[in-house]
Image (tube, rainbow, N blue to C red):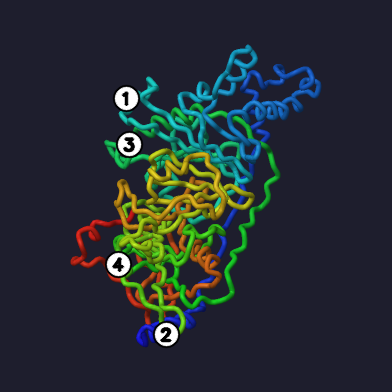
Amino acid sequence: MRVLGLISGLWLVLGSAGSAAQDIKSPRLSFAQIDWPAAIASLTNVEALRPTAMSARSRTGGANRAVPLALARLNAVMSRHFASLTTSPVPVLMPFDVDALLRDQAAGADSGGGDRYLSGFQAARFFYPGPAGYDAAVAIRTSDIPELSDIKFPEPIQVQISGSALLYELDVPASIEGAPVASLEQEFPGIRRMIHEHHLRYTFMRFGAPYVVSIACFDSSVSRYKMPTCRAADQVALRFLRALRVVGGMPRNLHAAEPLPVERPTRVSRSFGYYGPGQLLSGTGFQGQRGRADATVYSQIRFPLEDAPAFVTSEIYQRRSRAQPAEAEEGPAPILPWRDNFCERRGFPVGQCPAGIGHQGQDIRPGPCKPPPGADRCTHRGNIVAVRDGVILRSPRQEAAYLFVNSVNEHIRFRYLHMSPRKMDADNLLSGRRVHEGEVIGEVSNFSMKEAGTSFHVHFDVQVPTRVGWVFVNPYMTLVAAYERLIGERGIEYSDPSVVVSTDPASTGSISPVTRVEPDRPKPAKYTKHSPKKSKARRQRHAS
């Protein structure tokens, strides 16, 4: 006990000495300038919305009055198919044949559901408009479409579209801006195509707003990981793009966006410490590259786990000892500090990482599991909660759950991985479900393409909309700030003299040493990589 007390004392000394930490910051935001007059003028392409087709009352004001009334009529009709679309400050584009619907209504024909006007796509189960723009997803079963019958993919292919008035200003490498698409240039001036972060992506500007259409795909000749090939996805994307029409929205006066101020407790923690952003565990970067020193808090979230303690560390390169430290004689026993693993060596493209490849998010491990009375193992390892109010995007049997947030000063999405798909289906954690901050949405599990496919933990990542589409950003300091609010104490930031980090996402050469070197301070206990003597079950565990 005296030894543990001494270790605890050293921990506290180190924590106090390292309190002069790197300042955290808020994201840089901007608003697109929406050309609503051009969007409204485009409605005259729909015969039923032309001035000559409007009512006598509409015509009395002339063409200038008829065009805004055309938008009002469009919103009234399309709100039955896309709820709350008037909350979007950008023109809502969807693959919907508005002209055909209005013709059928004028002829007294039963228009029925919206599927018949969606160019073969299924009605949007996920449609989420708000003050920052809108997000939507539709799906298509290619076997039902003669022109797509050569695509041998049995599951529906999901297409996502986002139009965002609010943009996050990031340093985006030129390599992910995509290539021009000559065949679509006339319809979509400036459109660009890319395959990035396992998504086929088309980005374009329309009416002053940036839009992105994306489909998850695998860039090879065969589909893998329950994803279609990117070649198949491209055929679906082209059909989707050519069917896009303005279905509504509402002009608004947009002002320069101000991010929410970062809130941090003033009391310094005696038990929570973390290494600074970008300081990967030594040797875990890709080809010698290091982490992304991003001190940005992208959102004032609720921490993803319901209870403390929790640990943000690498699940694939290190393990915490199964033996938990006992209570020290004075004060709490020391815990292991957090470690950024956003850019650690994985096979996923990440434009914000110096090497262009990384982990995409952070691994979060819950505290020690305590078996219930009379049991020798845990049956429940902790609840996972919604980090903000928002809407879920997730199909049945899918292992990834997205939470979209859309507010005046925030447009962001969070992804949770490793929860059990079967339980998520049973709990109705599916597209369109609205959740509230702090609401339990699942439990810590170990699913990764199969049950027990990884260790018990949560993978959590953050994506924000930019002019080149959704981009993964480092969630590390966002999680640090959220955990501080959960425990009501401010953590201590440590500096690892053996680690250097980069602030340049496009850097492929030498890396600038920007961490604080503190050679005279004792270090906390080191993590270790997997030992070859571990059991076969432990060796087979991995994290995505």
**Marks 1,2: beta carbons within 8 A:** no
Q: Amino acid at mark 3?
A: Thr
* Residue receiving disc 1: 150
In front: label 2 or label 3: 2
Label 1, label 2: how far apart the Cα atoms are: 70 Å
Foreground of the two, 461 or 60: 461
* Residue receiving disc 3: 229
* Residue receiving disc 2: 329
Local secondary structure at mark 4: loop
- Examine the rendered structure and indicate whether residue 16 appears above or below residue 33: below
Q: Mark on residue 283?
A: 4
Local secondary structure at mark 2: loop
Image quarter (top left, top right, bottom left or bottom right) of the N terminus:
bottom left
Foreground of the two, 399 or 229: 399
In front: label 2 or label 4: 2
Residue 311 seen in this snapshot:
yes
Query: If you read the primary sequence from the N terminus, does the residue marked by circle 3 or circle 4 appear first?
Result: 3
Point out residue 501 in the picture as x, y percentages from the top left corner.
40, 68
Query: If you read the primary sequence from the N terminus, does the residue marked by circle 2 or circle 4 appear first?
Result: 4
**Marks 1,4: beta carbons within 8 A:** no
Q: Is residue 447 left or right of residue 89?
A: left
**Marks 2,4: beta carbons within 8 A:** no
Q: Amino acid at mark 2?
A: Glu
